[in-house]
Amino acid sequence: MIEIENVSKTFTLHNQGSAVIPVMEGATLSVQPGECVALIGASGAGKSTLMRMIYGNYLAASGRIMVGGIDVAQAKPRDILALRRQTLGYVSQFLRVVPRVPTLEVVAEPLLLVGENRDSALARAGDLLTRLNIPERLWGLSPTTFSGGEQQRVNIARGFAHTYPALLLDEPTASLDAQNRDTVLSLVEEAKDRGAAIVGIFHDEAARQRVCNREIDVTGFTPVAA
Amino acid sequence: MTPLLQVRDISKFYGARLGCRDVGFDLYPGEVMGIVGESGSGKSTLLGCLAGQLAPDTGEVLFDTRGEGPRDTLTMSEPERRMLARTDWAFVHQHAREGLRMGVSAGGNVGERLMAVGARHYGDIRGQAIDWLDRVEISEDRVDDKPTAFSGGMQQRLQIARNLVTGPRLVFMDEPTGGLDVSVQARLLDLLRGLVREMGLSAIIVTHDLAVVRLLADRLMVMKDGHVVESGLTDQVLDDPQHGYTQLLVSSVLQV
């Protein structure tokens, strides 16, 4: 489902003496449906960079990033947008929403975008929020005023609302209490059971043990200093 | 799928001075494209050329018309272009006063657009006007007030209602949130985003506010000195800018 081949990444800082910083080289990995692969490596090793390239948020300098038959490294914006709508979900560490939109709508939005009818989309959103312990009295409010932990759970609910065939998870269990952490890991297991291919970053080792089939150390993709 | 708008090699000079040069892109139905750049970068000139308000020196603007498929709006006759501007296009100006008739009531401002496309029944027109005022959160009891009695944010929302009432397919917006309070901006952004989604509109939004394009635009074009220096997915251009100017623009945003 996700096939990454020989991907490299450099940052060119035009306003800082045009410094060219190579950050990744030869990244290769493959994730089958129903499999969860953990990216590991020290902070700064490039876990998030690789994940952002898979999502098309960072441009790859070279290589192929095939997701559901589309090469994200080459695809037009319009094809990446369609891929993100239908196939590829991403749970980032931060929630970014339009002010004033109620939480229930924020969570239901990915479903509405793929043409789900409104009632069932809102029902699914409500189920997820309930499982993640966001009390119903908050559903009508914008999540911009919520605590950090609540925002993170809203973000997770949103990320799991549509049953994407491929999912990217950036620290989904960070700073959650034991019960919510358990719920998130169950959501990951359910996604695997329905055949989703998942790439995740989990600093929590026990979480990794529970849901991940394999680990890939991105330190192996660090460019060798010339 | 046929693009709603295909723009090819648009250049516009003001005498010897460059307005914009060799701009081209495709816009598909339902897509929202942002154009950012500092004052004088040519973004408003480009918007004017696309919307038929300025005549570019070179290039074509192919619009997928309902009847005859893609046609170059620059070479069509003035009456045809005016008809398109009334039915399929909308233009939201930065200053609401430019897009409103200040001497006519709020309901009249909205109703006038309906009459321009053939509506004649007074009750229907008033009903639709009230419905649209409600959608942009202007209460029914203000329908007979003139826009001069409205706040800046309300005038802007009225302008949006006036523009969208006829169900256009393409909306041009020039700094739609410029000069408004942040709280009013948030309300307007929420409103615009909802309308774009519900009506399946395509839109081109010119702004210098990166936060606005991040929330509204799928794609982004960055202009400097009349040229497009970078374009791509909005979040990619903002999070991994490739051109020196875009890097400068993104790193200059003050964090709140």
Image (spheres, grey):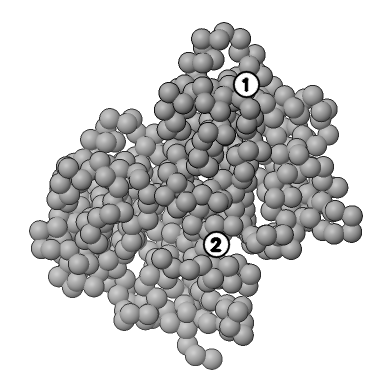
Residue at (53%, 76%) from the top-left corner? A10
Name the residue beneath numbered marker 1: B112
Above or below, B106 relative to B19: above
* Furthest residue toward bottom: A226
Seen from the viewer's position, the closer of residues A170 and B10 is: B10
Residue at (60%, 39%) from the top-left corner? B96
Residue kind at label 1, given as amino acid type: Glu
Seen from the viewer's position, the closer of residues A56 and A189 is: A56
Residue kind at label 2, given as amino acid type: Val
In the figure, is residue A154 to the left or right of B56?
A: left
The chain that hosts pointer 2 is: B
Let me know if marks 2 and 1 both belong to one chain. yes
Let me know if residue B72 appears in the view. yes
Residue A35 in picture, x, y percent from top left: 27, 58
Instruction: Tally the numbered discs.
Output: 2
Q: Secondary structure at mark 1?
A: helix
Q: How many angstroms separate mark 2 from mark 1 (CA)? A: 40 Å
Quarter of the image for the N terminus of chain B: give it: top right
Above or below, A216 relative to B64: below
